[in-house]
Amino acid sequence: MTLPPKPASRAGKVSLWRYMKLFRQDILSAQPARLYRAWMAEFKTPFFRSYMCNDPDLVELVLRSRPDDFPKSNRVREGLAPLLRQSVFVTNGAQWKRQRRIIDPAFEGGRLRDTFPAMWDAGRAAVARLQPLANGHPVEMELQASHAAADVIFRTLFSIPIEDQTAQAVFQEFRDHQRTAPVVNIAAILPLPKWLPRWHRKRTRQTAAKIRALITRLTADRTAAIAQGTAPDDLATKIMTTADPVTGQRFDTEEMVDQVAIFFLAGHETSASALAWALYLLAMHPEWQDRAAAEAAAEIAPEKIYFSVLGKLRIARDVFREALRLYPPVPMMVREAACPEHFRDRDVPKGSQIVLSPWHLHRHERIWDKPDAFDPARFGCPNGKKGLRRAYIPFSQGQRVCPGAGFAMAEGPLLLAMLLREYRFELVEGRPAIPVAHLTVRGKDGIWLRITPR
C-alpha cells in the first residue's frame, strides 16, 4: 500500500533553541515520533511549560466541558497580530463572546442555502479557469485551489468575484503574507512586557497593512451601501447589521476589518489547503477518483443550481473529510490553563500552554485503524465512526468551533465534485508533495498535478 506523504519526525531530544529553529521551519517535523502514540506529553522551557494532549477525554475537557478555563493562548496572538489584531480567532472572555453573538447568526440554518448560489458560481468559474491548463502539463494546484477558495469567500462575503480589482489585490497580498509570516514570534517564547514593541518581519508588516487597507475599503463601501439601502443580502451585510442581543452594539469598521481578515484566513487558506490535498490524494488513488467523478457526473448538472445536491455527493464528502483528517489545515491549537490542573497523574501549573494537535490526534496509532492510510470508506466502519466522534477536530469543537464549519463542508465537496466531473488529475513524477505547516498545512514545494479533460 502506498501511503500519503508524511513529514519525518525529529530524532531524539534537542535543545530549546534547536527546537525553535526546527519549529520555525515546520511545526510538524519538529515533533518526535512518539507523539503519534502518546496520550500526553510535557515540554519544558525556561519560560513556560507546554502539554500536548492527545487523550480524547482531555480534548473533550478543554474544548467542551470547561472551555472558559482554557482560553486561547496569547502566545498564538503574538505572531498573528499584524493581520488579525482583535479578531474572534484570538480574543477571549467577554470580548470573544460578544463577537460570536454577532457573527454566528450569519452562518446559522438557512444562511447556507442563501449563499449556495455564490458557491456554485465560484465552482463553475474554477472549472473554466482550469480549462486552458488541462493539457497534461504540470500545474501547481495549491495556487488554483487558493484562487477557487478566495473566489468563494469574496462572492459569499461581499458579492464580488475574485476578478474584482480589490478582491484580486487582497488575494495576491495574502499569498505574500502567508509566505513571510512566521509560525512563531519571539514574543511567543520570551515573557516580554506588554509595553515592549513586538518584532515582526518588515514584509509581514507590509503585507498585513496592505491587506487591512484593502479590506477597510470594502467595509467602508459596504457601510455606505447599507446606509443607502442598496447593500446585497450577503454575509458581510448580515454581520454588519447584526446587533449584539446583550449590548446592542454592532461592529465598527476597525473590528469588522479584524473579522474579515480571519474569515479570509480561515475560510480561504484552510479550504484551499484541504481542496489541494484532496485532489493530490485522489491522484494517488485513481480508483477513488473514478468513483468520485462518476458520482459527480450523475448528480451535477452545471446549468442548474440546486441545493439538494450537497446531500447526494457522499463520496466527495468522505474524500474531503479524509483529506481533512490526514492534512488538517490548522495542525495545532494552543490554549492556556487559567488555573492549576491535574491531567493524567501530572500537575499542570497555572499558565501552562495546552496544545491540542489535530495533526497527531487524526493520525493517532491507538485510535485509528491504519492511521496514515487514505481510506474514505473508513467513516462507514465502527472504528471510523468512533474516530469521528472522539478524535476528529479539523474545525475545533465546543463553543469555539469554527462558525464556518458547515460552510466549509458544503464548499469543499462541491468544488471537488465540480472539478472531478470535468477533469482527471494525475501525479507528476519527481514532484512529490511534502507537507509542511506554517499558517496552514501546505506542500513544501507546492502540490503539482497533471490535468486532462475527462
Image (cartoon, grey):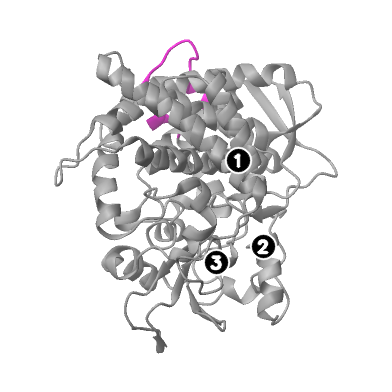
Q: Residue at x 36, y 55 (%)?
A: 91
Specify the amino acid type for callout 2: Arg
Q: Secondary structure at mark 2?
A: helix
Residue 137 seen in this snapshot: yes
Which part of the image, by quadrant, shows the N terminus? Answer: bottom right
Q: Pinpoint residue 382: horizontal percent, then vertical percent.
A: 42, 58
Q: Tag 3's secondary structure? A: helix
Q: CA distance from mark 1 to mark 3?
A: 20 Å
Q: Residues within 10 Å of mark 1 (few under 14, many from 20)?
A: many
Residue 243 in percent (x, y) is at 20, 37
Reading the image, the residue beneath label 3 is 187
The residue at 47%/39% (across/down) is: 267
> Within the image, what quadrant is residue 46 found in?
bottom right
Where residue 223 sits: x, y (%)?
32, 24
Magenta segment, which residues? 295-313
Q: Quadrant of residue 390?
A: bottom left
Q: For the residues labelled 2 and 3, say whether their Cβ atoms are less than 8 Å apart.
A: no
Q: Nearer the viewer, mark 2 or mark 3?
A: 3
In the figure, 453 relative to 410: above or below? above
Question: Which residue matches tag 2?
Answer: 24
| Inter-mark Cα distance, 2 to 1 | 19 Å
Residues under numbered marks 2 and 1 in contact, where contact means CB atoms less than 8 Å apart? no
Percent position of residue 408, x then y: 44, 38
Foreground mark, 2 or 1? 1
Badge 3: how crowded within 10 Å, few (<14), some, or many (20+)? Answer: many
Report the Cα–Cα distance between label 2 and label 3. 14 Å
| Residue identifier under label 1 | 207
- Pick the quarter of the image with the C terminus: top right
SS at circle 1: helix
